Amino acid sequence: MRTPPLAAFGQPPAFSAPLHVAQVNLPEWGRVENAFRGIFERRYFANHGPLVRELETRFAETVGVGHALAMTNGTVALMVLARALELTGEVIVPAFTFPATAQALIWAGLKPVVCDVDPRTHMLEVDLVRPLVTDRTSAILGVHAWGRACDPDELEAFTRDRGLVLFFDACHAIACTHSGKPIGRFGAAEVFSFHATKIMNAAEGGCVVTNDAGLAKRLRTIRSFHQQETFGLASARLNGKMSEAQAALALLSLDDLTQNVFRNRQRYQAYAGGLSDVPGVSLIRYSENEGNNFQYIIVDVDADRFGVDRDLLLDLLGKENVVCRRHFYPGIHRALPAAQLANPDAALPVTDWLSSRLLQLPSGQSISPDDVARICDIIRTVHRYSKEIKNHSSDQK
Ligand SMILES: *Cc1c(COP(=O)(O)O)cnc(C)c1O
């Protein structure tokens, strides 16, 4: 047998230190130091200080909405929004998402109804949602997976006709567009995340954007019980405020956004080139006509054509110090306690199928085009030696 030239078969790993998925985008230290010196000089650390206000103004302008409300993180922003929308009963969510989407609803006292997704877009669509609407349904929470839009036009028409609320988890979708319009302008409100793995990194942070002034007011009330002297105005309030330290990082990240998107796009193109001749591994596509942040390098692994399945590829890449992630895995119907869901026994074949095949590959500031080429080489080698790899793993069973 030919021995595969891979770390799993005794070769040194391709990378001496682990390369992680979503290597964070960080501004230069000098700029961070300056921003933090300002915070220390002002002695204003929390409670909606000047940097949080500046971030809210600039972010709202970037998206083109009336109001941006900065919060501790994307999950808290979703929780506060689900409360401020004054929803009741059930909310339809895609099963193929990050658990936070549904967890936030549960914290807001709502029952998530899990819905399958379209195999091509990986997202909700009206035909999938329609059969799940009952008289208990109050809203639909769409997720713009990978920064591609979750069919806002069709969903807006559908929810308008039925008096349902539509809102979006746009945590992936900073600097993305739908029909040329920035994501953030759709539905009643949308939520962004500034988690370290996202294109804008505030070392945790999030934001709700909306054009509805009344909703913005309720969001402010729920976000902070320090905001007003009276504590009894909203049914449940919390401390979801963003700190000045977070806002300082978010602002630097906003300054760097165009450049970081540009570099992400170069890495994406390097992956597209490097994987184009590997059968059974297809890179997710982004429309040339829309903005995308290219933060998500997602490949679909077709085990029959590629030769090994996604999980074995993940394992072999891990041994080369290329730390990838199954994303989203598993579907939320398998990640959350059944009692928390309205329909825990729903059959969700597309979600299960996608979560068995998709793999997120490393990108971000510290991944060079040369690193990308080496990662693609490893994947090509795995394909070339797939027979030997499979024989070997079946010998070991
Ligand atoms: C990151 C993410 C969240 C949660 O955001 P945090 O800021 O980490 O709380 C929610 N939904 C999706 C789709 C995400 O990717």
Image (tube, rainbow, N blue to C red):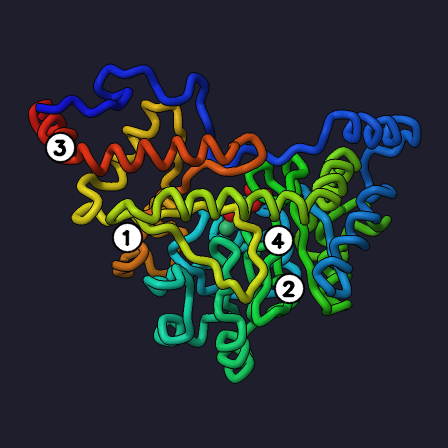
* Residue type at tag 1: Asp
* Distance of label 2 from label 4 (alpha carbons): 8 Å
| Residue that carries the numbered disc 1 in the rendered image | 352
Please rate how many residues cluster around mark 2, counting C-alpha atoms within 10 Å: few if below 14, some from 14 to 19, many from 20.
many
Q: Residue at x 47, y 53 (%)?
A: 102
Give the residue number, with chain letter if any, for mark 4: 174
Whole-number angstrom distance, CA of label 1 to CA of label 2 = 30 Å
Say which label, 1 or 4, has the lower sequence index.
4
- Dot 3, crowdedness within 10 Å: few (<14), some or many (≥20)? some
Residue 363 seen in the figure: yes
Q: Earlier in the sequence, mark 2 or mark 3?
A: 2
Mark 3, mark 1: which one is toward the viewer? 3
| Amino acid at pointer 3 | Lys
Q: Earlier in the sequence, mark 3 or mark 1?
A: 1
Q: Which residue is mark 3?
A: 390
Q: CA distance from mark 1 to mark 4?
A: 27 Å
* Occupied quadrant, residue 388: top left
Q: Position of residue 230 (x, y in %)?
A: 83, 51
Instruction: Answer with left or right where residue 303 lies relative to residue 328.
Output: left
Q: Give whichever of discs 3 and 4 has the lower sequence position.
A: 4
* Secondary structure type for disc 4: loop
State the mark number for residue 182.
2
How crowded is the residue under tag 1: few (<14 C-alpha within 10 Å), some, or many (20+)?
some
Q: Residue at x 81, y 54 (%)?
A: 57
